[in-house]
Amino acid sequence: QSALTQPASVSGSPGQSIAISCTGTSSDVGGYNYVSWYQQHPGRAPKLMIYDVSNRPSGVSDRFSGSKSGNTASLTISGLQAEDEADYYCSSYTSSSTRVFGGGTKLTVL
Amino acid sequence: QVQLVESGGGVVQPGRSLRLSCAASGFTFKKYAMHWVRQAPGKGLQWVAVMSYDGSNQYYADSVKGRFTISRDNSKNTLYLQMNSLRPEDTAVYYCAREAVGAVYFDYWGQGTLVTVSS
């Protein structure tokens, strides 16, 4: 049950696009289309942003998109805004019927 | 509206036990699998355990297996986490989270309850 691998930090200027990667194995990310992404502001509970690799829940901006290739999933945020500054976590279903999170990525909007 | 309210956190000595509760409202609790997820201070999210909608299946992270027990009372719309043999590394905010029906993602989260394991 090793954590999925995410970059510790990413940054971008307002209006730019950034991508956050999430690398696992064939037993989690690569084996299922069950990757989800969560946004967490300081002191707040996580919020679902993307589910099943690339689906957006109602109410989430279409600036957020997800994709997957092999054992690596990605979250892309386009048109960066100040309010996007937060921590982002990926999560995957695993072959053991458990769940696993990534280590988290701190997004800084410059 | 969906609400998940955790309680039961506090300061506990290493080796002791604690039971967390998560009171659910605003949805049909018995239809949903429920999870516990924790976050150590300044650290990332760590999945802890899941229980199926009817309580027939449960799975645990290796780090808590044999020490923690997840349970639920569908008549009380409440999820529990019994934590035994607590260790300092169990110090964290514990969140309960709802799993969307027929899916494997967390669509609603509580605000969390802080557990501190310290002598």
Image: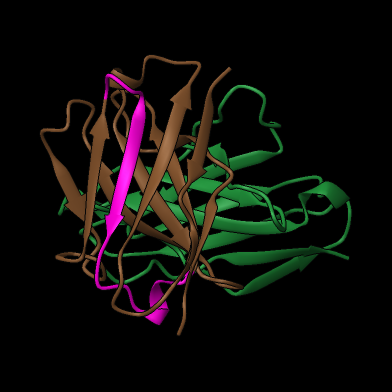
Chain colours: A green, B brown
Image coordinates for residue A98, horizontal then vertical, percent: 23, 52
Image coordinates for residue A60, horizontal then vertical, percent: 66, 31
**Residue reaching furthest to the bottom:** B119
**Residue A97 in view (yes/no):** yes
- In front here: A92 or B48? B48
- In front here: A55 or B74? B74
Q: Residue at x 25, y 73 (%)?
A: B85
Is residue A4 placed above or below A54 in the rendered structure? Answer: below
Instruction: State the image quarter where residue A19 is shown.
Output: bottom right
B43 displayed left or right of A33? right
Q: Residue at x 71, y 38 (%)?
A: A63
Image coordinates for residue B119, horizontal then vertical, percent: 45, 85
B83 is within the stretch colored magenta = yes
Which residues are drawn in magenta?
A: B74-91
**Residue reaching furthest to the left:** B56
Is residue A12 placed above or below A92 in the rendered structure? Answer: below
**Residue A100 in view (yes/no):** no
Q: Residue at x 58, y 72 (%)?
A: B41
B79 is within the stretch colored magenta = yes
